[in-house]
Image: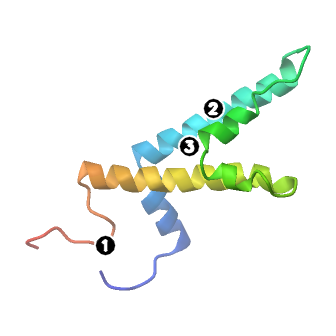
Amino acid sequence: MDGSPRSLTATVRHHLLNPMALGYLAMVVGVLAYVEVDAHFVEQQDASFAGLLLFVVTAPTSWLFLMLPEPLPWTGIVVGALFQAVVLGDAYRKLSGRPRHGTRPSGA
């Protein structure tokens, strides 16, 4: 590695642009769409627990934000989704055998 710092866009591209991370983020967006449709277009007699699905999908990171004051639990969903996507992206890179950005294959 040359030791030069990567730009923010290069770092985001490195961690989030792979099938595993993108699939996870697409699932989170799908659950968010379901929750929005349920909240705005479905008539219900009682309260809906659909909003809890966002915390379940982004758990356990989002659960750390649940006891904080009001706007922060919803921030926990974003932080949890991005953190889990980065972890899944790194796991995908390691399991698929693709080298990390800036590393050279052995023997080169």
Q: Residue at x 75, y 28 (%)?
A: 50
Q: What mark, if any, has residue 102 been given in the picture?
A: 1
Disc nearer the start of the sequence (3/2): 3
Q: Helix, strand or loop at disc 1?
A: loop
The three-letter code of the residue at mark 1 reads: Gly
32 sits to left or right of 104: right
Question: Where, by quadrant of the figure, is residue 54 drawn?
Answer: top right
Position of 14 compared to 46: left or right? left
Q: Give the camera-side residue of 18 and 79.
A: 79
Q: Give the farthest residue toward the left.
A: 107
* Earlier sequence position, callout 1 versus callout 2: 2
Whether label 3 touches label 2, CB < 8 Å: no
Quadrant for the N terminus, please: bottom left
- Select label 1 or label 2 by which is in front: 2
Q: Amino acid at mark 3?
A: Leu
Is 27 above or below relative to 100?
A: above
Q: Which mark is residue 25?
A: 3
Q: Are marks 1 and 3 in contact (CB under 8 Å)?
A: no
| Disc ID at residue 30 | 2
Mark nearer the N terminus (1 vs 3): 3
Image point (84%, 17%), residue name: 42
> Is residue 63 left or right of 17 when viewed as pictured?
right
Q: Position of residue 67 (x, y in %)?
A: 79, 54
Q: How far apart are labels 1 and 3 at the CA level?
A: 25 Å
